[in-house]
Image: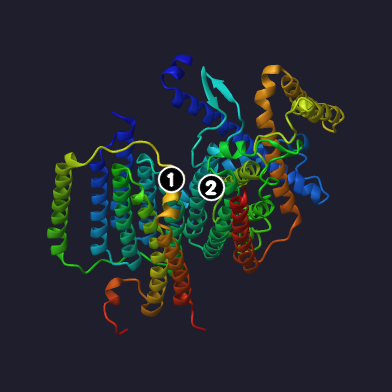
């Protein structure tokens, strides 16, 4: 039996790596991917707790997180396409002012 | 060593290696591939935790649809190699050790509180139980998410349409 | 070996099954290419492969050797890692899906361990198979991107958009079957189709109460042909359109891997159609005492086929053919004779009917390829989103109404 705390540590490590990537990377799409990594880490914590407590609510929540992440990725990437079209660059440092 | 422990550590190593590779790689497509590796490793972890339906959904929806969307956008926008960042040197020399310290502290506090966690139940969760819960107690959020997906589809199409 | 099998039963038995299945699958895929070329040729009033070995039977061997010895070209500006990864991904995913397919109901004994005729009996088998096919989209997309060429990229984007769109209809069209069977496990889905209505009509999902899944089957097969990028849906990889699509820049072994991956997914989809809609390994004849002579149909079929090949072969034009074909016929007839033995009959019934149905579906695949013209890309997408997707949803709604109204 793998103790639940191991899964929580893995989840914390993945979340931390997602935050590090979010702070250090400059490409908008890579930033988005770091957000998805953070969401995945949280999903793992949910499933681990659901298994520990013997209730299935955690897994239903994971289901909803995945669905909402899909909707968010679709709209977010549409916005990224618009930014790339208008600013001609995917570097987040060039998108730091409202004026073109 | 128990087979489960070995599997857990192999999958955990794969997930962490994928996440580190996501940050280290300079081309977005390699980062996307590393994220797919992380997701597949996490699907394996869900299987270890007995939730086979969530593992299958993770692969079908997350790794098989959302990441395909990311890969499409990277190909369409022809995203190139990332340029050198102008961030300060202090971020590297102070930030990374601080992050490592935070991680050590988190791991230590989780280990300390692990004794108070209840013993876990074993056995796989059947899809039927999950479906019963989803369609009986959580039917209202379920219908709301379908409206959310519809709004997201319309929003994405309207935003990305080319003005002609 | 038996002692080793007793010590680690799951490992040894699984390894043996995997090795046997891989060998059989690779041979079957090689001869599937021969089968396709022959059938398409006969549809077009010509012979097909004829010279390489009697009736072109050595053509797959010649093709394999050609692929091994061709020069392996990697474009200079291509992303090397992704360029090599893409065909391996397609090939390995397509071949691993065969591990989930059950071939027969009875257990066989390998090195003293009783084991079912299936490599992995997963309780969410169907969902897992769809997971593997949805990752297969990456093989195509990454191949086009890594080739660093305009035609490849366009072909890859079109092909992966097509695969993603038809995947929706594919998974939805199967929901009717799931509602009627109540489970995602392949064995239980087949077991739910056991029995005969009015004593004669098999209770396969295609004809079964409460709602015959005809619409589901039509949607499934059409979506599957589009998903595996076969004619009439093969615009992204057709010669003459966009170069050769996403595999323009691939040569020799990597191209062969794409090729084999496509045929392997064809085989998987045919197996799925047989399992979900046509009763899998269940015989189309009732199993009552009056019909017990149908047990000898596999043996009779093999013996007749073997004797026909012998009779045809002794008068063949080349000397090699006059030797090889009768030997082949003798082997097939001998197999048929073996199947009349009492021990072998029960074990062989299930796999025979299953493989028979799979071969029928493969023939339909090749038949459609030889007959229908290619769809234009916008026609293809219109069909996927505006015709198949609503039809699949209608099927789900009707089936759920029928299942709910069942007393």
Residue found at the very far top of the displayed protein: C3
Q: Position of residue C179 (x, y in %)?
A: 57, 48
Q: Residue at x 62, y 53 (%)?
A: C399
Q: SS for tag 2?
A: helix
Give the total number of marks visible in the rendering: 2
Q: Residue at x 69, y 40 (%)?
A: C203
Of residues C40 and C270, the one nearer the viewer is: C270
Can residue A12 be seen here? yes
Given the image, what chain letter belongs to the residue carrying mark 1?
Answer: B
| Quarter residue C389 falls in | bottom right
Can residue C324 be seen here? no
Q: Position of residue B122 (x, y in %)?
A: 34, 36
Vertical placement of residue C48 versus A65, above or below: above
Vertical placement of residue C300 versus A31, above or below: above
Q: SS for tag 1?
A: helix
Vertical placement of residue C294 versus C198, above or below: above
Q: Is residue B106 left or right of residue C34?
A: left
Of residues B155 and C17, the one nearer the viewer is: B155
| Quarter residue C11 falls in | top left
Of residues B155 and C74, the one nearer the viewer is: B155
Of residues C329 and C170, the one nearer the viewer is: C170
Q: Position of residue C232 (x, y in %)?
A: 68, 58
Residue found at the very far right of the displayed protein: C315
Circle 1 Cα neighbour tier, 10 Å, few/some/many (<14 / 14–19 / ≥20):
few
Q: Is residue C117 left or right of residue B55?
A: right
Residue indicated by mark 1: B129
Q: Residue at x 82, y 48 (%)?
A: C46
Q: Is residue C347 left or right of residue C257?
A: right
Residue indicated by mark 2: C254
Q: Are marks 2 and 1 in contact (CB under 8 Å)?
A: no
Vertical placement of residue C332 versus A94, above or below: above
Q: Residue at x 42, y 71 (%)?
A: A78
């Amino acid at each position: 039996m793998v103790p639940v705390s191991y899964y929580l540590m893995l989840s914390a490590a993945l979340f931390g790596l997602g935050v590090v990537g979010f702070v250090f990377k400059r490409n908008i799409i890579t930033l988005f991917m770091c957000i998805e990594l953070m969401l995945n880490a949280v999903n793992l914590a949910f499933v681990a707790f659901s298994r520990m407590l013997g209730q299935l609510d955690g897994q239903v929540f994971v289901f909803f997180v995945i669905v909402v992440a899909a909707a968010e990725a679709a709209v977010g990437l549409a916005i990224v396409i618009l930014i790339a079209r208008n600013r001609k660059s995917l570097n987040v440092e060039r998108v730091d002012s409202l004026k073109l | 060593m128990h087979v489960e422990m070995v599997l857990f550590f192999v999958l955990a190593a794969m997930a962490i290696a994928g996440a580190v590779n996501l940050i280290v790689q300079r081309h977005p497509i390699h980062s996307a591939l590393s994220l797919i590796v992380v997701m597949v490793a996490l699907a394996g972890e869900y299987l270890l935790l007995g939730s086979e339906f969530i593992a299958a959904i993770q692969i079908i929806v997350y790794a098989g649809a959302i990441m395909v969307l990311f890969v499409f956008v990277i190909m369409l926008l022809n995203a190139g190699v990332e340029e050198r960042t102008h961030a300060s040197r202090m971020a590297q020399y102070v930030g990374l050790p601080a992050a490592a310290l935070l991680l050590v502290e988190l791991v230590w506090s989780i280990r300390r509180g692990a004794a108070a966690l209840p013993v876990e139940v074993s056995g796989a969760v059947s899809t039927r139980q999950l479906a019963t819960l989803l369609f009986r107690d959580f039917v209202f959020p379920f219908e709301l998410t379908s409206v959310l997906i519809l709004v997201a589809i319309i929003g994405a199409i309207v935003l990305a349409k080319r003005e002609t | 070996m038996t002692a080793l099998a007793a010590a680690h039963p799951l490992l040894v038995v699984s390894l043996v099954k995997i090795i046997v299945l891989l060998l059989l699958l690779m041979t079957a895929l090689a001869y599937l290419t021969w089968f396709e070329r022959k059938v398409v040729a006969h549809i077009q009033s010509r012979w097909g492969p004829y010279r390489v070995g009697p009736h072109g039977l050595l053509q797959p061997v010649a093709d394999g050797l050609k692929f091994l010895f061709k020069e392996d070209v990697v474009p200079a500006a291509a992303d090397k890692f992704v360029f090599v990864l893409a065909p391996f991904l397609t090939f390995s995913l397509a071949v691993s899906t065969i591990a989930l397919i059950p071939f027969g109901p009875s257990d066989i004994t390998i090195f003293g361990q009783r084991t079912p005729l299936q490599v992995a009996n997963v309780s969410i088998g169907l969902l897992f198979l769809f997971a593997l096919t949805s990752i297969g989209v990456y093989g195509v997309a990454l191949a086009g991107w890594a080739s660093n060429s305009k035609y490849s990229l366009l072909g890859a984007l079109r092909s992966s958009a097509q695969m993603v769109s038809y995947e929706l209809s594919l998974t939805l069209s199967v929901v009717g079957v799931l509602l009627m069977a109540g489970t995602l496990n392949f064995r239980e889905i087949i077991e739910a189709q056991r029995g005969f209505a009015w004593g004669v009509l098999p209770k396969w999902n295609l004809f079964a109460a409460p709602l015959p899944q005809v619409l589901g089957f039509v949607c499934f097969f059409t979506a599957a042909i589009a998903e595996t990028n076969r004619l009439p849906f093969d615009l992204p990889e057709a010669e003459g359109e966009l170069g050769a699509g996403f595999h323009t820049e691939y040569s020799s072994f990597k191209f062969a891997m794409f090729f084999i991956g496509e045929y392997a997914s064809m085989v998987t989809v045919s197996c799925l159609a047989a399992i979900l809609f046509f009763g899998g390994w269940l015989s189309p004849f009732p199993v009552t005492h009056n019909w017990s002579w149908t047990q000898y149909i596999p043996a009779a079929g093999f013996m007749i086929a073997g004797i026909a090949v012998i009779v045809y072969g002794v008068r063949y034009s080349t000397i090699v053919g006059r030797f090889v074909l009768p030997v082949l016929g003798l082997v097939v007839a001998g197999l048929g004779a073996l199947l009349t033995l009492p021990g072998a009959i029960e074990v062989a019934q299930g796999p025979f009917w299953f493989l028979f149905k799979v071969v029928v579906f493969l023939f339909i695949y090749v038949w459609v390829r030889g007959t229908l013209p290619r769809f234009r890309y916008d026609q293809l997408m219109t069909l996927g989103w505006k015709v198949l997707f609503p039809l699949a949803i209608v099927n789900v709604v009707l089936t759920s109404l029928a299942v709910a109204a069942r007393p």
